[in-house]
Amino acid sequence: MDQAETPTAIVTGASSGIGLGVTQALLERGWQVVATSRAIRTSKELKPASNLVLIDGDAGKKETAVKVVETAIKHFGRIDLLVNNAGIYVPKAFTDYTEEDYNLVMNTNVASFFYMTQQVIPQMKKQDAGHVVDISAVIADQPSSGAVLAVLSKSPMPAVSKALALEYAANNIRFNTVSPGVVDTPMHAGGNREAMAKFHPLNRVGEVSDIVDAILYLQNATFVTGENIHVDGGVHAGR
């Protein structure tokens, strides 16, 4: 397949956890990927190749989004999938959050979605095809104490995906959301695994592969848009 015809993805927060898993899964399936995080070029798991470009940068800044999208078009000539995965979790009591905490979480979780999505849409419109998957969190539906900034930053994602799914349906650009429960990633490495498992009715911690499978499903399900898939061991059903 010609490089210009090979499907191409952008993955944010790709140096570890879900972002790394998605990047590796796409590469294994013959995709071209532009992967980004703050220091992804130091990654031991990902190395630049003809089908993989690594870009260091803060996904919450517009200049990073511009650079990533321009690079994808320059190297691969197309953008078929954007996975807005960049995210950070800062657990604190609500009144303990600082202005710095607020800015860090909102920039990483919300501004990254805004700038990156805004930049990919013109290319997807030109192609008359594209797909954006936003990674939210089940605590947007079933909040927990000590996680208000996570709720504030992640709860808009399903609604925004629905709005954009309608706005760009005529351009054949789809928007979907995946809402994980607690997943075994470096973000939760120091947590009590037994307690994290009990958070879910299925009584286990999610695996990166569980989230990757949902994203791959959505990519292949071309009649699905505006959807929010909960990959949370049943948390969204109630606790």
Image (cartoon, rainbow, N blue to C red):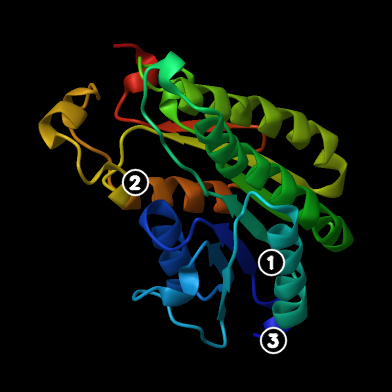
As shown in the figure, which amino acid type bears the numbered disc 3? Answer: Asp
Q: Is residue 203 visible?
A: no
Q: Quadrant of the N terminus?
A: bottom right
The residue beneath circle 2 is 210
* Residue 68, disc: 1
The correct choice, above or below, for 205 with respect to 199 in the image is below
As shown in the figure, which amino acid type bears the numbered disc 1? Answer: Val
Dot 3: few (<14), some (14–19), or many (≥20) neighbours within 10 Å? Answer: few
Tell me where residue 238 sits by quadrant.
top left
Residue beneath the point at 77% across and 70% down: 70
Residue beneath the point at 55% across and 30% down: 102
Q: Nearer the viewer, residue 170 or 203?
A: 203
Nearer the N terminus, badge 1 or badge 2? 1
Q: Is residue 62 visible?
A: yes
Residue 173 horizontal/vertical position (percent): 76, 48
* Residue 2, disc: 3
